Amino acid sequence: MPEGEGAFPILALREGAVERTGVILATAGATVRRVASVGDARGPIVANALEGRLRAVSPLVPRPADRRFDITLTGQMEGYEWGMDGAADMRIRSGERIEIAMRNASMMSHPMHLHGHHFQVVEVNGAPIAGAVRDTVLVAPGETLTIAFDAGNLGRWPFHCHHLYHMAAGMMAFIDYDARD
Ligand SMILES: [Cu+2]
């Protein structure tokens, strides 16, 4: 909150449209004015551009990937089927640097979530970056994004779209540590 007294709208903008909604945080006694539900400008389109501007405070030590998976996110509203082509058999070993390159061939954004690890965004739409460290990243329609992590947490870990209705309709995969570890 800013210093001092006042009322501070926190607005959610509709993507590509003028509608908005939200809450108003106000100090005691502040005058709370009505905020119109329609703004002057359209809300921004959610794409990978913002992600591409982020840089990690504590990035991975740069090194070549030992193993890379190329995954295409697929799906359509008709028939409501969603998929992760190329993610059927993702086996890794402890100590490896892993890269997962994702291309979103569908018309919707997918928040892709990996269990058991934090990963770094290392490529957005073809541009290599030392990007944000996360466990979930949004992959926008028609765009590409690559994540990297150091394998070191034995197990069988879900890697999936965090829209649970996409996950239930096919956007579900697993990263499996090789049993020889
Ligand atoms: Cu999804």
Image: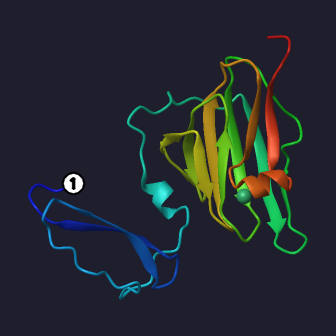
Q: Quadrant of the C terminus?
A: top right
Quadrant for residue 81, please give it.
bottom right
Percent coordinates x, y for residue 66 in the rendering: 71, 28
- Residue 45 horizontal side relative to residue 146, left or right: left
Question: Residue 55, relative to residue 40: is it above or below?
Answer: above
Looking at this view, name the residue that lies furthest to the top: 180
Residue at point 73%, 71% (across, down) = 107
Percent coordinates x, y for residue 43 in the rendering: 45, 78
Q: Residues within 10 Å of mark 1 (few under 14, many from 20)?
A: few
What is the total number of numbered labels drawn onto the structure image? 1
- Residue 149 horizontal side relative to residue 32, left or right: right
Percent coordinates x, y for residue 96 in the rendering: 69, 22
Viewer-closest of 65 and 154: 154
Looking at this view, name the residue that lies furthest to the left: 4
Question: Residue 70, relative to residue 125: is it above or below?
Answer: above
Residue at point 68%, 32% (across, down) = 98
Query: SS of the residue at dot 1?
Result: loop
Quadrant for residue 33, please give it.
bottom left
Q: Quadrant of the N terminus?
A: bottom left
- Residue 126 horizontal side relative to residue 13, left or right: right
The kind of residue tagged 1 is Met
Percent coordinates x, y for residue 169 in the rendering: 85, 56
Residue at point 31%, 81% (across, down) = 35
| Quadrant hosting ligand 1 | bottom right
Q: Respond yes or no on whether mark 1 lies under 8 Å from ligand 1.
A: no
Question: Residue 7, relative to residue 176: is it above or below?
Answer: below
Residue at point 40%, 84% (across, down) = 37
Q: Which residue is mark 1?
A: 1
